[in-house]
C-alpha cells in the first residue's frame, strides 16, 4: 500500500444497503436473506461488508472455507455463518467458533459427526447440501436413507436446513434445466418430510434465482453477486449499484501508430492511432 497510496479500492456501503433493499423487495417478508461473503466478499472486503449486512438485518452469512468464518468471528461478527465448502481438517475450528458447516458428502458427514462427538456436542447445527444438477458438491436424493442411518446413531447434530444450488438461473435458454433443478429439490424436500421427523428450513435460490424464480424462495435465499451490484440481466443490473471501485493514477501515456504493439510478445496490436496508459497496479 505505501508504494502506491493513490491506488485505492473503495467500498461503498450505501450501495450495499441499496442492493440489499432491492433484493429484500423481491422476497416475502418472512423469507430469510443470507449474504454470501466468500472470497473476500467477492474481492471487496469481507469484514466491512459482513458488519454492514449484520446492521442491515441479514439473517445469515456464508463463506466457502472455515478459515474465512474464523476471520469474521475474530472481527466480532455474530450472525450465523454457513461454511459452504468445509474440509475434513477444519471441523474443530468450525465448532470452536460456532460456524455452521454444509455437509455435502458421506466423508464430510462422517468426519463431522466424529468431531462433534469428540467435542461432546449436542444438536450442533449443520446443513445438508443436495446435488440437483450443478454436479459440484452435494448428496444425491437417494443418499437420504444412508444419512438417516448415520443420524440415528447420534444426537450430536441437528439438521438446521436442506439446500441445493442452481447452475444456470441467470440463463433464459436454460429455463427447462433450471425448472428440472427446482423439481429435483422439491423431491428431496418431500422425501425428507416422509422419512424424518425433524423440520429443517429449505433454501435454493442465488441472486439470479431471486430475480427469475421467486416462487422457489422457500425459507431463505442466498445472495452474493447482487449484493455487490451486478446481475447478468440488463434490466435487473440497472437496479443495482456496484459496491467496489478500484482507482489509481496513470503513470505514463504514449501515442502509438497503427500496427505498433504494446506489451510482452506484442500482446496487443494497435488497429489505428491509439493512446495507451500504463497504471501502477498489478504485476508491478
Ligand atoms: C456463491 C454461492 C452463492 C451466491 O451466488 P450468487 O450468484 O453470487 O448470488 C449461493 N449459494 C452457494 C452455495 C454459493 O456457493
Image (cartoon, rainbow, N blue to C red):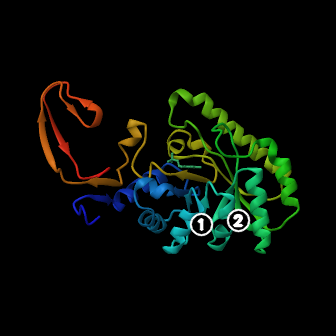
Q: Position of residue 132 (x, y in %)?
A: 68, 39
The residue sitting at 85% across, 65% down in the picture is 154
Secondary element at tag 2: strand
Q: Is residue 79 above or below residue 101?
A: below
Q: Residues within 10 Å of mark 1 (few under 14, many from 20)?
A: some
**Which of the pair 114/35 is nearer the observer?**
114
Q: Where is residue 232 in the image (x, y as percent from the top left)?
A: 43, 38
- Would residue 25 appear left or right of 278 to someone viewing this image? right
Task: Kindly indicate whether the residue at mark 1 contacts the one at mark 2 (C-beta within 8 angstroms).
Answer: yes
Residue under label 1, please give it.
80
- Would residue 150 appear left or right of 132 to someone viewing this image? right
Instruction: Determine which of the numbered discs, if any, sits on residue 9 in the image.
Output: none
The residue sitting at 66% across, 36% down in the picture is 133
Instruction: Choose top left, top right, bottom left or bottom right for residue 273.
Output: top left
Q: In this view, does 119 lie above or below 17?
A: below
**Which of the pair 193/81 is nearer the observer?**
81
The residue sitting at 65% across, 73% down in the picture is 96
Whole-number angstrom distance, CA of label 2 to CA of label 1: 10 Å
Residue under label 2, please give it.
125
Q: Position of residue 90 (x, y in %)?
A: 65, 63
Q: Residues within 10 Å of mark 2 (few under 14, many from 20)?
A: many
Q: Which numbered disc flags the more N-terminal residue, 2 or 1?
A: 1
- Would residue 13 appear left or right of 121 to someone viewing this image? left
The residue sitting at 23% across, 63% down in the picture is 5
**Which of the pair 52/193 is nearer the observer?**
52
Amino acid at each position: 500500500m505505501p508504494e502506491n497510496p493513490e491506488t485505492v479500492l473503495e467500498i461503498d456501503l450505501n450501495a450495499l444497503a441499496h442492493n440489499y433493499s432491492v433484493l429484500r423487495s423481491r422476497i416475502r417478508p418472512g423469507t430469510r436473506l443470507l449474504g454470501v461473503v466468500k472470497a473476500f466478499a467477492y474481492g471487496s472486503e469481507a469484514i466491512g461488508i459482513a458488519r454492514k449486512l449484520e446492521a442491515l438485518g441479514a439473517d445469515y452469512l456464508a463463506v466457502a472455507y472455515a478459515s474465512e468464518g474464523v476471520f469474521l468471528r475474530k472481527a466480532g461478527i455474530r450472525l450465523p455463518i454457513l461454511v459452504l465448502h468445509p474440509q475434513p481438517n477444519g471441523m474443530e475450528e468450525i465448532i470452536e467458533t460456532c460456524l455452521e458447516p454444509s455437509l455435502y458428502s458421506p466423508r464430510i458427514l462422517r468426519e463431522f459427526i466424529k468431531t462433534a462427538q469428540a467435542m461432546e456436542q449436542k444438536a450442533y447445527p449443520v446443513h445438508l447440501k443436495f446435488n440437483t444438477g450443478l454436479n459440484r458438491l452435494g448428496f444425491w436424493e437417494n443418499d437420504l436413507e444412508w444419512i438417516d442411518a448415520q443420524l440415528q446413531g447420534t444426537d450430536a447434530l441437528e439438521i438446521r436446513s436442506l439446500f441445493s444450488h442452481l447452475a444456470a438461473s441467470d440463463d433464459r435458454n436454460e429455463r427447462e434445466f433450471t425448472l428440472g433443478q427446482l423439481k429435483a429439490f422439491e423431491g428431496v424436500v418431500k422425501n425428507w418430510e416422509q422419512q424424518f421427523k425433524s423440520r429443517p428450513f429449505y433454501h435454493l435460490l442465488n441472486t439470479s434465482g431471486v430475480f427469475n424464480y421467486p416462487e422457489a424462495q422457500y425459507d431463505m435465499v442466498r445472495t452474493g453477486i447482487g449484493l455487490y451490484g451486478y446481475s447478468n440481466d440488463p434490466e435487473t443490473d440497472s437496479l443495482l449499484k456496484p459496491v467496489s471501485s478500484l482507482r489509481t493514477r496513470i503513470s505514463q501515456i504514449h501515442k502509438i501508430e497503427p500496427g505498433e504493439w504494446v506489451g510482452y510478445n506484442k500482446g496487443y496490436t494497435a488497429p489505428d492511432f491509439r493512446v495507451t496508459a500504463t497504471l501502477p497496479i498489478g504485476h508491478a
